[in-house]
Amino acid sequence: MRVIKFALLLLSLVFVSCTEVTDGWGVLLGNAAFQRGEFQTSSLTYLQVSPDPSTRDVVLYNLGNVDNALGEANTALAVWAGIKGPSSDELEFRLAFNRGHLLYQRGQYEEAYNEFKVALTLKPSNLSAKRNLELSLLKILGFGLGLSPRTTTAAPVPKDTDKAMLDYINRLEGSRWKANNQLDTSQSSSSDW
């Protein structure tokens, strides 16, 4: 009975649509390679997925993530910009969140704020999006910039009296070191305590 059910399931997958199964499998393999840090393998696997409109947005999103992981911020933003009207709310949320995170890292705080706002409209309970929205707002308002840089002044030029004082201290400290190096070995170690 089990064998018959498995055979029916296998036949239904074959006759339904082979491209959907292979495309989904390709995306899963690409995601696994990405998680292992094999970015070239994941990119090549994503590029082998058919350009079907149902998988195109997911593939572009994942390719943008690979570019972002490789430090190619401009390429990641360009790839993500190629996704017009994401096919699901989850994908739209992830796109907005990742774009916001990348823009924040680049110092484009207003654009990041807008992206996190879009992400929060899609998932109002997401704490990471809320925190990042607040951080972006703080940067925009200037609270997150920290202390103002210290003013640099030229080092003071030592006077002759300052040099004389430093020489005196150097001689005094030098004589102390010499006196401490001459230990009296006649005393026992028990008297040291």
Image (cartoon, rainbow, N blue to C red):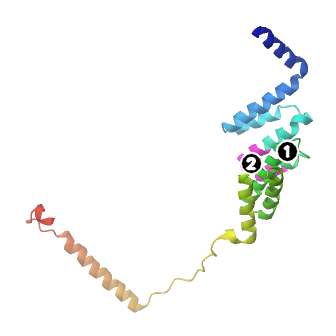
Q: Look at mark 2 in the image and give the residue it sits on.
A: 68
Amino acid residing under circle 2? Asn
Classified by dominant secondary structure, the portion drawn in magenta counts as: helix
Kindly indicate the quadrant of the structure image that contains residue 47: top right
Query: On screen, 176 above or below 98?
Result: below
Q: Look at mark 1 in the image and give the residue it sits on.
A: 89
140 left or right, relative to 162 = right
Contact, mark 2 vs mark 1 (Cβ under 8 Å) = no
Looking at this view, is 44 or 11 the one in front?
11
Q: Residue at x 71, y 58 (%)?
A: 131
x, y percentage for residue 154? Answer: 55, 83
Magenta region: 64-78
x, y percentage for residue 187? Answer: 9, 66
Circle 2 packing at 10 Å, graded few (<14), some (14-19), many (20+), is some
Q: Residue furthest left?
A: 186
Circle 1 packing at 10 Å, graded few (<14), some (14-19), many (20+), is few
- Decide whether residue 104 is among the magenta residues: no
Evaluate whether residue 106 shows in this view.
no
Query: On screen, 15 above or below 160?
Result: above
Which structural element holds mark 2?
helix
Amino acid residing under circle 1? Asp
Looking at this view, is 80 or 160 the one in front?
80
Question: What's the CA distance linking mark 2 and mark 1?
Answer: 21 Å
Q: Residue at x 19, y 74 (%)?
A: 179
Which structural element holds mark 1?
helix
